[in-house]
Amino acid sequence: MFRGLYNAATVLVLSATAVGAHDNRSSGESSKVTLVYEHKLPNAPGKSIKGVLVEYGPGAASEAHTHPSSAFIYATVLEGAILSQVNDGPIKTYRAGESFSEYPGDRHGVSENASRTEPARLLAVFVVDTNETELVLPIK
């Protein structure tokens, strides 16, 4: 089941980028976040699965953030390498094909492109309350 879901989400991501969603950003800029998939879960009333493409230009980063308290996230790097730190854990480098997860209430302190010269992309798949519309919440 998950392999089929991953493949379907990958097709959606590739389709989204084929129509011009890719963004070349200069060093130090933020990431580009695009909702590419959303589906209510028929066996879990009130829950949905949402696929979010996060694109980083060379040197780009996301600000420190959390997600809705109902969100479980499974992220897979599609291209390049991503530096990531969840809660007070170590900063880790994830390369294309590698994955990590975030649990409800986790803080994502570091999320950035590991390269200053190449782009990076990841697909974050959320299982979240259907009524949640803001999936990334900046830490103030």
Image (cartoon, rainbow, N blue to C red):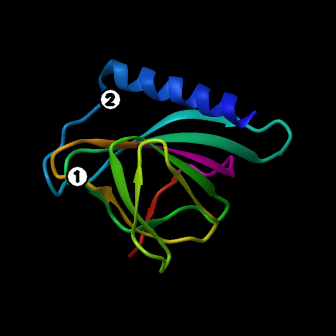
- Amino acid carrying mark 2 in the image: Ala
Find out whether residue 124 is within the magenta segment.
Answer: yes
Q: Secondary structure at mark 1?
A: loop
Above-or-below relation of 50 to 27: above
Tell me what residue is drawn at x 32 percent, y 29 percent: 21
- Amino acid carrying mark 1 in the image: Ser
Q: Which mark is residue 21?
A: 2
Cα separation between marks 1 and 2: 20 Å
Above-or-below relation of 15 to 103: above
Q: Which mark is residue 115?
A: 1
Q: Earlier in the sequence, mark 1 or mark 2?
A: 2
**Image quarter in which the N terminus is found:** top right
The main secondary structure of the magenta stretch is strand
How many numbered tags mark residues here? Answer: 2
Q: Is residue 96 left or right of residue 104?
A: left
**Where residue 97 sits: x, y (%)?**
48, 42
**Where residue 95 sits: x, y (%)?**
40, 49
Q: Is residue 61 left or right of residue 76?
A: left
Above-or-below relation of 30 to 80: below
Categorize mark 2 by other alpha carbons within 10 Å: few (<14), some (14-19), many (20+): some
Q: Is residue 66 left or right of residue 58?
A: right
Q: Which residues are magenta?
A: 122-133
Q: Quadrant of residue 63?
A: bottom left
